[in-house]
Image (cartoon, helix red, strand yellow):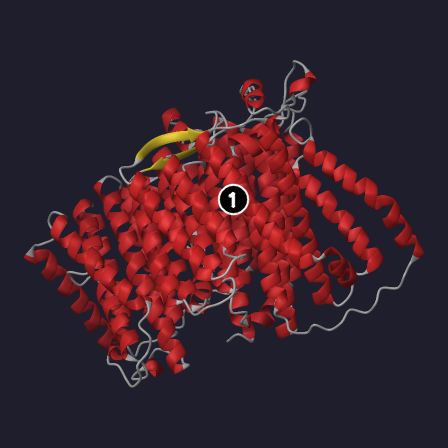
Amino acid sequence: MNTALAGVVAYLALGVLGFLFRPRWLSSALAILAGAVSLALWAPGFSEMTLGPSSWGIAVVGDELARGFWALALFLHVAVAWHERARLGAFQPLLTLLTGTALAAVISIDLFNLYVAMELAALLSFLLISYEAKTKAVWATLQYLLLAAVGMILYLLGVGLVYGKLGTLSLSQIRALAPGLSDPTVAIGVGLLVAGASVKSGLFLFGLWLPPAHGYAPTGVSAVLSGLVVKLGVVALARLAVAFPLGDVLLALGVVTGFGGIIYALWERDLKVFLAFSTVSQLGYILIGFGIGGGAAQGAILYAVAHGLFKALLFLAAGQAIEEASERHIAKLKGKLAWPSALGLAVGTWAIVGLPPLAGFAGKETLSLAVPAPVGWILTALSFGTAAAFAKLLPLFWPGQGRGKIGGLALLACGVIGLGLLGVVSLPGLVSLTAWGKALLVAAMGYLFYFVFRRFQPALPRPSLDRAITTALVSSLGLIAGFLFTR
Amino acid sequence: MEGLSAFVLAIILVGLGLWTLIERRNVIWKLLGLNVASGGAILFLVAVAYRPQARPALLGLGPGPTADPLPQALVLTAIVIHFATLALALAYVIFLTEHRHTQDIHKLEREEE
Amino acid sequence: MKWVARTAILALLSLVAVGTRHLFPRPDVAPWQEPTAQYGAENAVAAIVLGARLWDTLLEVLVYALAIAGVKMALGGLGRARPLPPVPETPLLRRSADILLGPIVILSLYIAASGHLGPGGGFPAGAILGSGLLLLALAKGVERLSQELHEATWERSEYGAIAALLALGGAFLCLGFPGSSFLVSANLLITMEVAIGAWVVLHYFARARGEV
């Protein structure tokens, strides 16, 4: 435990020192080194324990979830810091601090410590999204800020109710109490906690701040936000699900957010906003996995890591393409991409639609092998929707003129391919003709669906700020009422 | 049921804050509403700490019922976080006012399209 | 559209009220005397904030410092460094600042240094010191005060203070707790950080507005 804590503290302290000393890359490099050493030392894991006296202290755990997210965070930090190495100013220290916060958040199993870590991650996201001081990005940040504050008010009320009833903040102690949801106070409190974390992690209907914020953020920032930061809220939900019986709730949230994100992604024309909607839908897979639990939770962790890699790759490639062509519309980008960004988009797309043997295939297949049959059909439908949505990127894969920069794209592409191959070789049941055939068939049907229905353009309601606040409040209400009346 | 009034006040404050947040179109008003609402959430935690006839949890005060120190410590953290977020939000509002010359969310959204 | 949100707020809060109703009767407080004494404090809140839940506090200090950095980033690039009009010398403000500044500084240092014994601590002390700076700024003008204070140096030392706090706190989290000397030094570091941060926010807001 001490090595993990020392790693996080070193990460944060080096991030702060990055504001003071030049060269800026030095503190980032030292932080990554410290984090990697710390991960290597605690990688066997440590069991739940409390810092400080058991009545007040903060409980931490080093389990499989924490390990997976530490590896993902460090890898993404390396790739994005390398890709954005030309950025001066506060960018690198902020990135280091954001990664350090993620490291802190995933080992925590304390209700209030999770709150503080999520707030810090959100604050760093605000700074990074508005980093280039463009009006659209600042407006997106302000929307994010308002919605996140609403979420955190709900979360704090939940902390008050749960602590007032159970007398502890540590999720391991709460699990030992096994409160269940029969008590109305606990049911409402947990409902508020889940609603707050859902708003924070940008689930569909709860957190409609996500598409503009991720869409208008600077290139490298979108990659880290979509790859890592939104999943901190999902990690908080998974931690809550260990202490309270939340399996069905997470499953329902996963289905809603999965299909909601897909529907918007299908008809979105702005490249980066499209990728952001696809992030919303992919959170659904992870939530479904955590909701089922057991082997599916492991699949969810694998899929979260894989999604972090290929979504970061997609965002880096997309951001670079947008910078090269000075154009955000998918249709108008055709033929204007240099080969590295075109190839990056291609590899990322193949991974996200689940073509073997890339990382997305390993994650999706592990997940669907571990879930019961009806949920398996939901996952297949989501994969089909993803393939249909991503079919419109197909014309972008043929590169145009120009040399383009490679940077972190190569690193991430290697990560996507390497994790996929490793997963296919080492995990059971992935080298089978049915699995590969099914993945190819779903992808092909998705593409076919797109080419049949591409002229069809429904007018979906745009999520404005007031609407986003309203949907967040209404869906929180629905969630809590559901908790109260189905307990 | 002693100590209920603080809970009631806290919930009313959250309600007033959220109500302002959805009613007003001006971003500054929205932020004010949010601030009132987070003040209510903080007061809610203080109310959780309350015990009838309690004293503050200081060692020198002798025996007797005391308030719960843990929520009070959480409140300290939550106040600082909300202050920091509000300062940042106001800075963004100043930035947007400089560049877009409006604080009305409908105009901010319309010009964006 | 709005009535949906209104109804949702009312329903949400009545549900919270239902939950609150079932919180009663309140249970007794868990024993806090022994762990408080273990941390070398008399104030249980100080023992929690700087001892048992030091990890939260470190992250919270980072939140504060980064919000200040964010204000600087958002307002620093506004690109209209128009000079502030000189503040007229008002004898009333000037005198009251002269008289009050000393007590304010002493009070804030006292509250910081005795925060582990009674009500107080680094955050209120820093806020008090920051309000003293606000008084001085009203009397002297923001820009002039900023030059006299050597603001750039202080800003750098703010980051230094946070890094020191993180290093100290991290060492104590991993190696064990040394007692009240840490509580005092942490409170003083937090005071410094909060006061500098408050000053920086004041300075940038005043500059964006054009006057105090």
- Write down the quadrant of residue C73 in the picture: bottom right
How far across and down, in percent of the image, does residue C163 sit?
A: 53, 47
Q: Residue at x 24, y 71 (%)?
A: A346
Q: How many marks?
A: 1
The residue labelled by disc 1 is C59
Whether residue A343 appears in this view of the structure is yes
Is residue A79 or residue A458 the one in the foreground? A79
Q: Whole-percent x and y of residue A221?
A: 43, 63
Residue B108 x/y as whole percent: 58, 71
Q: Residue at x 78, y 69 (%)?
A: C84
Judged from the image, the secondary structure of the residue bearing numbered disc 1 is helix
Residue C113 location in percent, x, y?
Answer: 69, 33
| Image quarter hosting the N terminus of chain A | top left
Q: Specify the farthest residue to the top.
A: B63
Residue at the spot x=25%, y=50% of the render?
Answer: A302
| Front residue of A41 and A440 | A41
Residue B16 in sight here: no
Furthest toward the left, the residue is A433
Q: The disc labelled 1 sits on which kind of residue? A: Leu
The single residue placed furthest to the right in the displayed view is C91
Q: Chain of mark 1?
A: C
Name which quarter of the figure residue B102 lies in. Answer: bottom right
Query: Where the C terminus of chain A falls, by quadrant?
Result: top left
The vertical placement of C65 against B106, above or below, is above
Task: Tell me if A258 is positioned left or right of C113 in this view.
Answer: left
The answer to which of A56 and A376 lies nearer the viewer is: A56
Crowd around label 1: few <14 · some 14–19 · many ≥20 (10 Å): many
